[in-house]
Amino acid sequence: MKKIRVFVAGASGKMGQEVIRSILKEDDLLLVGASDTRHQGMDVGFVAGTQRVGVDITGPLDIDTLRSAKADVLVDFTNPQSVLKNSKTAILAGVVPVIGTTGLDEAEISEIRVLVEKENVGAFLAPNFSIGAILMMRFAKESAKYFPHVDIIELHHDQKLDAPSGTALKTAEGILEVREPMVQGHPNEYEKIPGARGADLGGIHIHSVRLPGLIAHQEVLFGGLGQSLSIRHDAFSRETYMPGIILSIRKSYELTELIVGLDNFLD
Ligand SMILES: NC(=O)C1=CN([C@@H]2O[C@H](COP(=O)(O)OP(=O)(O)OC[C@H]3O[C@@H](n4cnc5c(N)ncnc54)[C@H](OP(=O)(O)O)[C@@H]3O)[C@@H](O)[C@H]2O)C=CC1
Ligand SMILES: O=C(O)C1=N[C@H](C(=O)O)C[C@H](O)C1
């Protein structure tokens, strides 16, 4: 059986550790390397609280390390400042990046697309790997055809760097595919404190809550005549992302184009 060779960037992080634990359980996946700014030189199995696996954490990624690991896929859960460089390094090394890190803007995604086409090496990007979150986005897009007035409230742990979340942005972008940009609320409304109405994408207001104790939660709130509709997803642990990540590794390792969104891999 062909084993898919996987390198994990952000190996010491909250997601990286969980991803490593999951990879080690799959017979067709082989962990061939790990990088992080923390725990350098330590065995990843030890860091992720599993068996010793003999893969030590190296520092920030470079092309030679990736090439010598003979990786097929780079799974990236680092941070918004590192993800573009890591993804480009992977593509230049002939390795398909599976990008979970959020915070890439449109121009950066275009840069990846251009490099993918030039190098004929694929890439996969998903702001959310949880099936429940994908369904929330799908139902929100459907609902917006009938309820054009919508606010998004996303709630995350207080260590999150980017706001709004990648999921909130993807939800709003999906809604804007079926409902024209428009002004919501009173045309003469004003903010007594800047930001009171949240971020605005095509009239959709996005509110970002950051509190200790939370993991990842989002409510898409629609208002209509005499009624409202709420679509809510709650991630209570990071295990929720693992089936989607494992599926994406299996579907991505032979890609030669950029694909965005886990929904592309679901029936
Ligand atoms: N797509 C999805 O379904 C999900 C996406 N995410 C996203 O994943 C990202 C990571 O989240 P999370 O695990 O919670 O974050 P953490 O901060 O817990 O982990 C990130 C890790 O990456 C390290 N790191 C930073 N720069 C580099 C680099 N250049 N090379 C290697 N490692 C590096 C960090 O080290 P240091 O602290 O020293 O900087 C840290 O150990 C975020 O963008 C988050 O939004 C999270 C959950 C689900
Ligand atoms: O930082 C997180 O934790 C998460 N980030 C992703 C996002 O920005 O949407 C996915 C999920 O919400 C968890």
Image (cartoon, helix red, strand yellow):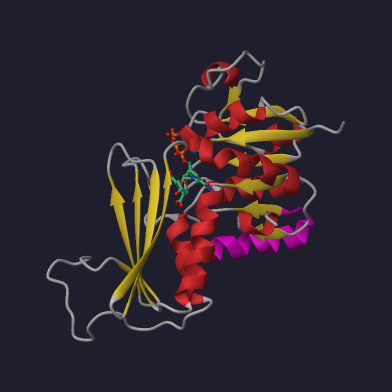
Which quarter of the image is occupied by the N terminus? top right
Query: In this view of the protein, which residue sits in the foreground, 58 or 246?
Result: 246
Residue 238 position within the rendered picture, expressed as x and y whole percent measured from the top left: 48, 37
Based on the displayed image, in which of its 4 quarters is residue 109 positioned? bottom right
Residue 150 position within the rendered picture, expressed as x and y whole percent measured from the top left: 36, 72
Query: Residue at position x 31%, y 42% from top?
Result: 158
Query: In this view of the protein, which residue sits in the foreground, 213 or 76?
Result: 213
Residue 77 in sight: no
99 vs 65, left or right, is left
Residue 251 in sight: yes
Is residue 23 in the magenta section? Answer: no
Residue 185 position within the rendered picture, expressed as x and y whole percent measured from the top left: 25, 80
Q: Which residues are magenta?
A: 107-122
Say if 148 sits above or below 258 in the image. Answer: below
Query: Residue at position x 69%, y 32% from top?
Result: 65
Residue 114 position within the rendered picture, expressed as x and y whole percent measured from the top left: 68, 64
Say if 25 sits above or below 260 in the image. Answer: above
65 vs 216, left or right, is right
Query: Residue at position x 63%, y 58% from top?
Result: 263
